Image: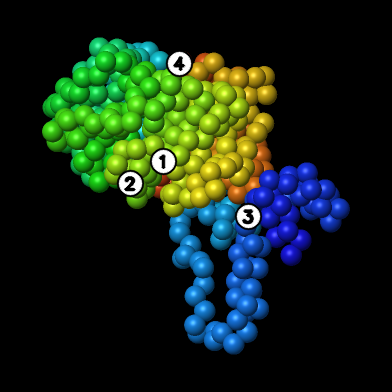
């Protein structure tokens, strides 16, 4: 009961009172995460008080079935089941001819792509990465190229590749660049290295997000206005109300899983929530990181929360229903703000929040439910990490850096004891 009270106080914004109670009862080492579970239980009990003759079979519970991923209404006290990110190891490394600036997994986690300032894009087969690692471990003599992970190398940009995304349903990769173009590549054709379609922009392209159905694409550029494209017709739409737009360039954009909303993050320090049908802004988190530029913003799988990262090196979890910050993940960037924008990520089951620390070159991670900080992981890059993405299906992620290298990290199975 005390833990429910402390969690409710955190949820209601009374942090000092919650901490005082936690110290008094001896659970200050790991206080419970913010949760309104106590409020919901009291509301449920009041139904019996207000209507003592109500029949149990007529009672409608105000709960929805638990969904996968992070949900503080139902699983606030659940312990993580996935391995800590500090236990991951590099099992594959590929090198570009210039800085690695973008990375993306497909929805199934079977492919991962990297984009570089050398204008090229590499697509790698994840199963081939594992096969290559097994061959190396077992000293197989099939040769270094028996299972080469890089299955496609694409060239059609004239400047840095800033962002890449896989189509949710088809074998299409889309990329945005400093050359002010968005290009669509059909990578099902092995001999084709050029784009099958090009969308011309007026400003460098910073971020992309596919509609979950694959018909539409949201594009963020160095202009404050967000563009919505129909992939088939290449027709562009913008919000009819100019006051809805950001006041500075947009750095990130992401659809929710159900496509009802999408979220944008901007240099102006605001996070905006957009209606996925009307293309109108429906909510704004003003000065979400105390005025610092927002590097990234993405929905949780159930669409109840938004994870943001800022140039202040702080990661925050926002509750969409109340439009407020529930948890701040602090401790990264102890030497100050970052010089380059970098995104925060969940692991594949949203047990952990991950964020590369620019100054130390390490990966910071926290328990997503209570912000308990975990051990650091040295990423092994000699310069800043500029690209970071976690697999949606397994304990694996990829980092790309200005040192030209992209590293694929994986949590190897612990060998059984004889």
Decide: is 146 above or below 225.
below
**Residue topped by disc 2:** 259
Q: Earlier in the sequence, mark 4 or mark 1?
A: 1
**Residue topped by disc 1:** 282
Report helix, strand or loop for mark 4.
loop
Q: Is residue 77 left or right of residue 155?
A: right
Disc 3 and disc 2: Cα gap in Å? 26 Å
Disc 1 and disc 3: Cα gap in Å? 25 Å
Report helix, strand or loop for mark 1.
strand
Mark 3 crowdedness (10 Å alpha carbons): few <14, some 14-19, many ≥20: many
**Residue topped by disc 4:** 402
**Residue topped by disc 3:** 35
Disc 2 and disc 4: Cα gap in Å? 34 Å
Report helix, strand or loop for mark 2.
loop
Would you say the residues marked 2 and 4 are in contact, meaning their CB atoms lie under 8 Å apart?
Answer: no
Q: Nearer the viewer, mark 4 or mark 3?
A: 3
């Amino acid at each position: 009961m005390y833990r429910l009270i402390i969690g409710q106080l955190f949820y209601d914004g009374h942090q000092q009172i919650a901490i005082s109670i936690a110290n008094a009862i001896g659970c200050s080492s790991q206080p419970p995460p913010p949760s309104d579970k106590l409020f919901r239980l009291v509301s449920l009990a009041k139904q019996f008080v207000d209507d003592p003759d109500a029949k149990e079979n007529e009672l409608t519970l105000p709960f929805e079935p638990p969904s996968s991923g992070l949900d503080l209404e139902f699983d606030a006290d659940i312990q993580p089941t996935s391995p800590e990110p500090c236990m991951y190891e590099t099992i594959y490394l590929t090198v570009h001819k210039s800085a690695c600036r973008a990375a993306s997994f497909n929805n199934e986690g079977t492919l991962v792509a990297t984009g570089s300032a050398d204008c090229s894009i590499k697509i790698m087969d994840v199963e081939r990465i594992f096969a290559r690692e097994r061959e190396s471990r077992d000293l197989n003599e099939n040769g270094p190229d028996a299972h080469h992970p890089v299955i496609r190398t694409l060239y059609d940009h004239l400047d840095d590749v800033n962002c890449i995304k896989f189509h949710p349903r088809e074998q299409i990769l889309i990329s945005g660049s400093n050359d002010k173009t968005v290009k669509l590549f059909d990578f099902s054709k092995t001999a084709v290295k050029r784009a099958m379609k090009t969308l011309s922009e007026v400003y460098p392209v910073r971020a992309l997000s596919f509609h979950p159905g694959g018909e539409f694409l949201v594009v963020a550029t160095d202009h404050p206005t967000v563009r919505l494209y129909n992939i088939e017709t290449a027709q562009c739409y913008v919000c009819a109300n100019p006051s809805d737009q950001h006041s500075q360039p947009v750095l990130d954009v992401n659809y929710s899983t159900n496509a009802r909303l999408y979220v944008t993050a901007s240099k102006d320090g605001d996070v905006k929530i957009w209606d996925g049908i009307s293309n109108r802004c429906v909510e704004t988190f003003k000065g979400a990181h105390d005025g610092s530029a927002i590097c990234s913003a993405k929905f949780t799988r159930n669409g109840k929360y938004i994870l943001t990262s800022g140039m202040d090196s702080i990661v925050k979890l926002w509750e969409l229903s109340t439009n407020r910050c529930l948890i701040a993940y602090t401790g990264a960037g102890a030497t100050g703000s970052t010089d380059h924008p970098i995104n925060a990520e969940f692991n594949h089951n949203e047990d952990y929040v991950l964020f590369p620390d620019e100054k130390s070159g390490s990966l910071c991670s926290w328990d997503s439910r209570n912000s308990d900080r975990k051990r650091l992981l040295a990423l092994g890059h000699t310069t800043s990490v500029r690209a970071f993405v976690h697999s949606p299906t397994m304990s694996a992620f990829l980092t790309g850096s200005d040192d030209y290298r992209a590293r694929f990290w994986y949590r190897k199975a612990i060998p059984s004891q004889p």
